[in-house]
Image: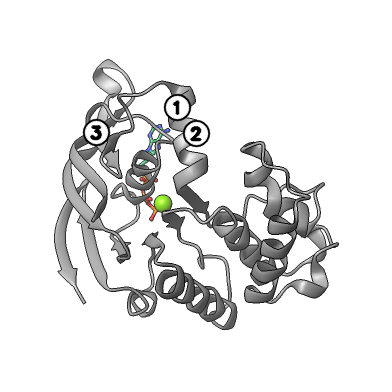
Amino acid sequence: MQVIKAEGLRKSFGEGANQTEVIKGIEFEVEKGQFVSIMGPSGCGKSTLLYLLGGLDTPSSGTVLIENKNIFDMSDRKRSKLRCNKLGFVFQFYNLVQNLTVEENILLPLKMMNKSVKSNAYTQKLAEILEIVNLSDKKKLYPNQLSGGQQQRVAIARAVINEPAIILADEPTGNLDSENGKIVMELFREINKKKGITIVQVTHDEEKVAYGNRLIRMLDGKICEDTML
Ligand SMILES: Nc1ncnc2c1ncn2[C@@H]1O[C@H](COP(=O)(O)OP(=O)(O)OP(=O)(O)O)[C@@H](O)[C@H]1O
Ligand SMILES: [Mg+2]
């Protein structure tokens, strides 16, 4: 089953003479359960592409389909809802809410969907995820009381709590040492294998590509290589 489809995707920034095209006609499909790595030189458009795939930014032309739904052909409200239900985001800088504890941060996506997070099902789910990311003993701490690697694990737990169909990750290990980088990648592999969550990650690190099963290389706003591993 195809879960992501990019059709004739283009994105320009700026106006008039200052306008530059950053995404220059991208087409591809991602099948359910794939673990895709996107590589390419700085400035080639990787983050911009990921934002478009997640509906966090709008294309200048072309579109994105998530599970066969055109996400730019729906209201902002509907798109936000789809984002909450279907997508999990992990960024290089963990984007945790500083005045919320670890467990409150992880439960945030459910709160945003107006789920009752105190229900037994979610208490159990939270415990299970804290176990997977190995932070059960840190759940009452605040982000600034955690190491970078631990914060990134909180961000991943938050991205998977509502069991999204797809995780979009922009250099998820970019700020971590090699040890913590490995832990995060193993975590990705596990959720990809066990839960069948589709993952699209941007990385600068050839070593991280081996955790996935497909490599897309970009150059100057276009895909220049697409290989199944
Ligand atoms: N909001 C914006 N306004 C104007 N230009 C932008 C904007 N966002 C990105 N760009 C430009 O688009 C180009 C691609 O940026 P992008 O962040 O997608 O690159 P990248 O491949 O992720 O690079 P890196 O590996 O350094 O993260 C850059 O030249 C950048 O300056
Ligand atoms: Mg980037």
Regarding residue 18, the answer to whether it shows in the image is: yes
Q: Which residue is mark 1?
A: 78
Residue at 33% over, 49% down: 43
Residue at 75% in and 57% down: 120
Disc ID at residue 86? none
Tell me where residue 142 sits by quadrant. Answer: bottom right
| Residue sitting nearer the eye, 95 or 168 | 168
For residue 63, the mark is 3
The CA span between labels 2 and 1 is 5 Å
Crowd around label 3: few <14 · some 14–19 · many ≥20 (10 Å): many
Q: Give the Cα distance between marks 1 and 3.
A: 16 Å
- Looking at the image, residue 58 sits to the left or right of residue 154; the answer is left
The mark lying in front, picked from 1 and 3, is 1
Where is 179 relative to 24, above or below? below
Q: SS for tag 2?
A: helix
Q: Residues within 10 Å of mark 1 (few under 14, many from 20)?
A: few
Residue position marked by numbered label 2 in the rendering: 81
